[in-house]
């Protein structure tokens, strides 16, 4: 047997678990990192920063909070984000108050929300007293309330917006709270990408939307409201586009509107991407058609494991057929789902021919003369499917 005869038959080309899916990214910070993680696993990424970070190095509010902490030592300082804590120290350095602030922070009970904040604290030459394993502000709050905050002064480094319920709960417990607003979230200067992201979500051009901060989720909802699209956006997030949040705080604006989200157990970008790698393929429809295993994804189809990209018109037809597998769908009904088709049913025939070519297996879709088209569902499939 020669070398050519010994060579194994090539299998389907390898593709990532997110191949065929389109994921929206709303992050302003670390968007490139998140996008790269998604693309390495096969996803098409649509990026539209839903906000921008405005540093407050020249802001009188931050300066006043810094001077108050230096002049009157708080009992506790809560650091919530690494970028915010570093920004605070840098701003203080710029005002000539860096060493005074660090000296004050060395003598207080310093709490860090998570490992990244701990790293920023230690890089500044400080040591945190405690950090929750859950990286949750709720656990930080529980610890403070259990210790008792009556009559204590607690400084809280905010991360772009007031922490929902956190400051209020401390004040209700008798604490004096000093907010430290290190930066603020603002709407993006160019709203065009956000509008295009919204349009893609509403037209089912996205399979998932990722959120890495609560302000980004709130900003997207706010833009939808400005355009009169709130109801449509909430509907699509509840039924068609998977909202994935990096953690429970990020999810709050969506949950307040009744939108259920998915979140990784560890509040990191890597686990967020891994969660999508599990969730999106599990949501994809898989059907036995004409002796083949066909998985219908956002912008592509897996035919026996072989990824077949499909144009938007073809995907619209395929989704319409897959909603009633094995049943005949009329040309008139298919024309209604075909984007920009007008009234000419010939457009359905043209798009169907292109769809069959894209799938590489024309007999997956049967033409039923004078009636329409149907998926050639295998006879062994569920008997509720048919052309009755």
Image (cartoon, rainbow, N blue to C red):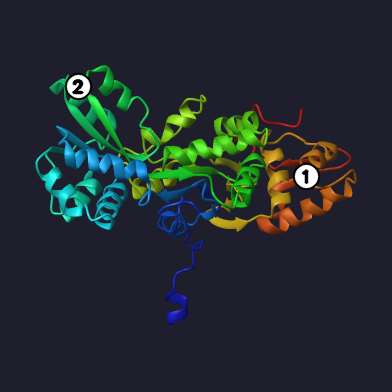
Query: Does residue 150 lie above or below 247 as drawn?
Result: above
In this rendered view, identify the residue nearer to me: 132 or 95.
Answer: 95
Q: Position of residue 328 (x, y in %)?
A: 77, 35
Query: Does residue 58 lie above or below 142 as drawn?
Result: below
Q: Quadrant of residue 222?
A: top right
The quarter of the picture where the N terminus appears is: bottom left
Which disc is residue 187 wearing?
A: none
Residue 220 visible within the image? yes
Answer with left or right where residue 256 lies relative to residue 352.
Answer: left
Q: Residue at x 43, y 37 (%)?
A: 214
In this rendered view, identify the residue nearer to me: 330 or 143.
Answer: 143
User: Label 1: few (<14), some or many (≥20) within 10 Å?
Assistant: many
User: Label 2: few (<14), some or many (≥20) within 10 Å?
Assistant: some
Q: Position of residue 289 (x, y in %)?
A: 63, 44
Tally of numbered tags: 2
Q: Residue at x 40, y 43 (%)?
A: 275
Q: Position of residue 100 (x, y in %)?
A: 16, 49
Q: Residue at x 71, y 31 (%)?
A: 386
Residue on which disc 2 sits? 145
Which numbered disc, 2 or 1, marks the residue closer to the eye? 2
Q: Position of residue 120 (x, y in %)?
A: 22, 51
The quarter of the picture where the C terminus appears is: top right
> Which element carries disc 1, helix, strand or loop?
loop
Query: Does residue 14 lie above or below 69 as drawn?
Result: below
Answer with left or right where residue 328 lies relative to residue 241.
Answer: right
Label located before the other in sequence (2 or 1): 2
Give the residue furthest to the left: 107
Which disc is residue 338 wearing?
A: 1
In this rendered view, identify the residue nearer to me: 234 or 301.
Answer: 234
Q: CA distance from mark 2 to mark 1?
A: 58 Å
């Amino acid at each position: 047997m020669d070398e050519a005869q010994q060579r194994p038959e090539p299998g389907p080309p390898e593709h990532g678990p997110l191949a065929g899916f389109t994921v929206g990214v709303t992050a302003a910070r670390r968007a490139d990192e998140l996008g790269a993680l998604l693309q390495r696993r096969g996803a098409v990424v649509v990026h539209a920063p839903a906000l921008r970070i405005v540093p407050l190095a020249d802001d009188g509010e931050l300066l006043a909070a810094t001077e108050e902490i230096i002049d009157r030592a708080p009992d506790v300082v809560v650091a919530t984000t690494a970028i915010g804590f570093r920004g605070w120290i840098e701003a203080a350095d710029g005002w000539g108050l860096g060493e005074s602030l660090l000296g004050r922070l060395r003598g207080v009970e310093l709490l860090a929300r998570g490992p990244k904040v701990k790293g920023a604290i230690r890089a500044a030459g400080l040591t945190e007293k405690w950090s929750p394993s859950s990286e949750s502000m709720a656990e930080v709050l529980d610890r403070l309330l259990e210790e008792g905050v009556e009559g204590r002064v607690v400084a809280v480094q905010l991360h772009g917006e007031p922490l929902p319920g956190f400051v209020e709960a401390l004040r209700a417990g008798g604490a004096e709270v000093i907010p430290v607003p290190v930066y603020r979230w603002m709407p993006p200067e160019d709203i065009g990408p956000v509008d295009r992201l919204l349009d893609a979500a509403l037209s089912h051009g996205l399979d998932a939307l990722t959120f890495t901060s609560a302000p980004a989720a709130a900003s997207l909802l706010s833009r939808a409201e400005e355009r009169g699209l709130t109801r449509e956006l909430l509907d699509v997030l509840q039924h068609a586009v998977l909202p994935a949040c990096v953690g429970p705080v990020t999810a709050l604006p969506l949950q307040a509107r009744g939108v259920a989200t998915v979140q990784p157990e560890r509040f990191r970008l890597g686990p967020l991407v891994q969660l999508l790698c599990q969730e999106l393929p599990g949501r994809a429809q898989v059907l036995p058609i004409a002796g083949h295993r066909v998985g219908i994804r956002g912008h592509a189809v897996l035919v026996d494991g072989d990824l077949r990209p499909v144009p938007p018109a073809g995907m619209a037809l395929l989704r319409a057929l897959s909603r009633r597998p094995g049943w005949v769908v009329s040309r008139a009904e298919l024309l209604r789902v075909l984007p920009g088709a007008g009234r000419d049913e010939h457009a359905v025939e043209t798009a169907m021919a292109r769809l069959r070519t894209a799938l590489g297996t024309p007999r997956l879709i049967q033409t039923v003369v004078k009636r329409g088209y149907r998926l050639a569902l295998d006879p062994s499939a569920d008997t509720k499917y048919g052309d009755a």
